[in-house]
Amino acid sequence: MKICQSCGMPMNDEAMFGNNVDGSKNEEYCIYCYPKGQFNNPNETFEEMVETCVPFMMKEGYSEEEARQYLNNNLKNLKRWQ
């Protein structure tokens, strides 16, 4: 399974892939982070991305503390944050 190299979201099918400038699918980034050949929020910092993702993880059953810890430990390893 592929995961977005920006937010860490699982991309289970091609519909979740972002788009390149030419309209082709980008398999590294999701549709939310990379909708039209560039990052949706190009100036977003790592810390801001963590804050963006926490509520989505809480909807999946994580506590706020668990979500924040998971994101801080795992997002830093993704391509966008290297």
Image (spheres, grey):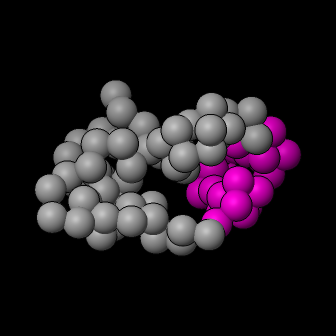
In the rendered image, residue 67, in percent from the top left (x then y), is placed at 73, 45
| Residue 6 belongs to the span the image colors magenta | no
The region drawn magenta spans 44-71
Is residue 79 shown left or right of residue 37? right
Residue at 68% from the left image edge and 38% from the top image edge: 76
In the rendered image, residue 54, in percent from the top left (x then y), is placed at 70, 55
Q: Furthest residue to the top? A: 1
The picture quadrant where one finds residue 45 is bottom right
Number of numbered discs on residues: 0
Q: Furthest residue to the right? A: 65
Residue at 64% from the left image edge and 66% from the top image edge: 44
In the rendered image, residue 21, in percent from the top left (x then y), is placed at 23, 66
Vertical side of 63 occupied by 31: above or below: below
Is residue 75 shown left or right of residue 34? right
In the rendered image, residue 64, in percent from the top left (x then y), is placed at 80, 51
Residue at 38% from the left image edge and 53% from the top image edge: 30
Is residue 50 shown left or right of residue 23? right
Residue at 84% from the left image edge and 46% from the top image edge: 65
Is residue 17 shown left or right of residue 60? left
Residue 27 in view here: yes
Vertical side of 54 occupied by 12: above or below: above
Quadrant showing the C terminus: top right
Residue 66 in view here: no
Could you say which is closer to the camera, residue 18 or residue 53? 18
Could you say which is closer to the camera, residue 62 or residue 79? 79
Quadrant showing the N terminus: top left
Q: Magenta-highlighted stretch: main secondary structure?
A: helix
| Residue 56 belongs to the span the image colors magenta | yes
The picture quadrant where one finds residue 78 is top right
